Image (cartoon, rainbow, N blue to C red):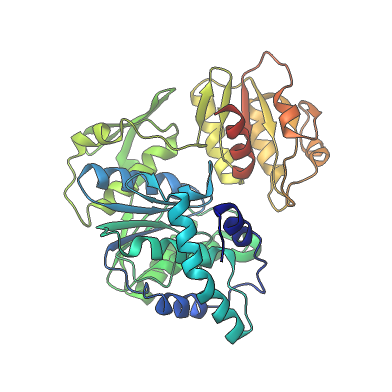
Amino acid sequence: MFSNIKDALYWLENIKRKERRKDLSRIKALAKELDVINPNYKIIHITGTNGKGSTAIYLETILEKLGYKVGLFTSPYIVNFNERIMINDEAISDSELLLTINNLYNVVKEYESKNDDIVPFFEIVVLIMLVYFKDKNLDYAVIECGLGGLLDATNFLNTDCQVLTSVGFDHMNVLGNTLKEIAYQKAGIMKTNKPFICYYDNEYYEVIKESSIINKANLITLNKEYIKDIKLDLTGTSFLYEDTLIKTPLIGNYQAYNLVLALNALKQFVNIDLKEVTNYLKDLKWPGRFEIINDNLILDGGHNVSAIKELVINLEKLGLTNLCVIFSALKDKRYDLMLKELDRVTSFYIFTTFPDLRSEDPNLFKNYTNKDNVVINYYKEALKYQTNLPKLVVGSLHFISLVRKLYL
């Protein structure tokens, strides 16, 4: 048992898993023991390679504006651990988080002792979320998958609607090496007779369609062509959908697509006046996603090839093609391909590293670009490097989280 939140989080974040999850029996057993296996609120479940977080925050924000009490579960965090678990835009407090962890601790340890097993970090975080939400009289919970879908720790829940944002190359060591293999894993969150909402993509759609037939899911396929006239500026993204002009303060082509996904998920439960959507979202903020810190600094959490491609498209549309990119990445990422994309908007790189055992040696990044660059081994020193170019910090969510704390 823990007397302070620092010790509790140290225990949680330093759990070493015994082996990769093979099924969901462990978390099911613990959820049953904790009486959270059948939540009494509706759940919208989100999977995808990129876009899960912004789709989730759109859902939570609009439902809250409509007067509902909404839980939100996302990962990873940008500012602090607590933001993983929120109710109506308010993160779980340190005192409630500590109490919830202490309430779980003995149950987890007893399970581990009886089963000669280790309950991994993410499963405990999911249980913390469910225990915290249990007595809060929620109407809805918007729950983001951690990784994949089929064997994700959130997938034991009997969810009411499932959303697929995108399928791209990331976590291939777990999810597979082709888009079809990855799509199969993500389609694993489908539930019988429940809506599963996604965009059509001919590279993997046959897998989605087959999964929907096997799972008897209600497949709702959207077409991006119905989202028209997407325009970006430094205040957000506007577009036409069903003859209605909609604007989100989040920047990026993909934000139009993520918002329309969210709107179609909401249609399964509530009536939405599209003319009010812009007003619902006017104060929305989503840290670390094309976040403009000041006139000279942009932070973006893009950490895989598909995310970087979209980022570059958006930078080009905004005319931001002469940047100093401060770049760092984890060892298991395709940073060679990420840098190839970033070359289109970069005049100068600063390659660096940050405190994480998985952080790659920045000297290796030099091998994948012909652009002028410098290696500065510690990120705080890299940020001090003087240049007249506007700066973009990118490559890892953990990296930009650390940078953001310095500035904000």
Q: Please state the total of marks drawn on the protein image.
A: 0
Extreme residue toward the front, this view: 3
Residue drawn at (20%, 45%) of the image:
66
The image position of residue 140, as x and y in percent, is 28, 57
At x 80%, y 43%, the residue is 361
Quadrant location of the C terminus in the rendered image: top right
Q: Is residue 312 left or right of residue 33?
A: right
- Tell me residue 23's x, y (percent): 53, 78
In terms of depth relative to the viewer, which is nearer, 213 or 38? 38
Q: Is residue 224 above or below residue 74?
A: above
Report whether residue 150 is seen: no
Q: Is residue 28 left or right of residue 326?
A: left
User: Position of 159 compared to 202: left or right?
Assistant: left
Please state the horizontal and vertical placement of residue 397, each as a whole percent of the image. 59, 43
Q: Which residue ends up furthest to the top in the rendered image?
A: 388
Please report the residue visible at 26 percent of the width from the left and 45 percent of the height from the top.
64
Closer-to-camera residue (256/127): 127
Q: In which quarter of the image is the N terminus?
A: bottom right
Quadrant of residue 383 within the rendered picture: top right
Picture quadrant of residue 312: top right
Which of 366/337 is in front? 366
Instruction: Tell me: residue 150, above or below residue 250.
Output: below
Residue 295 % position (x, y): 54, 17
Residue 209 appears in view: yes
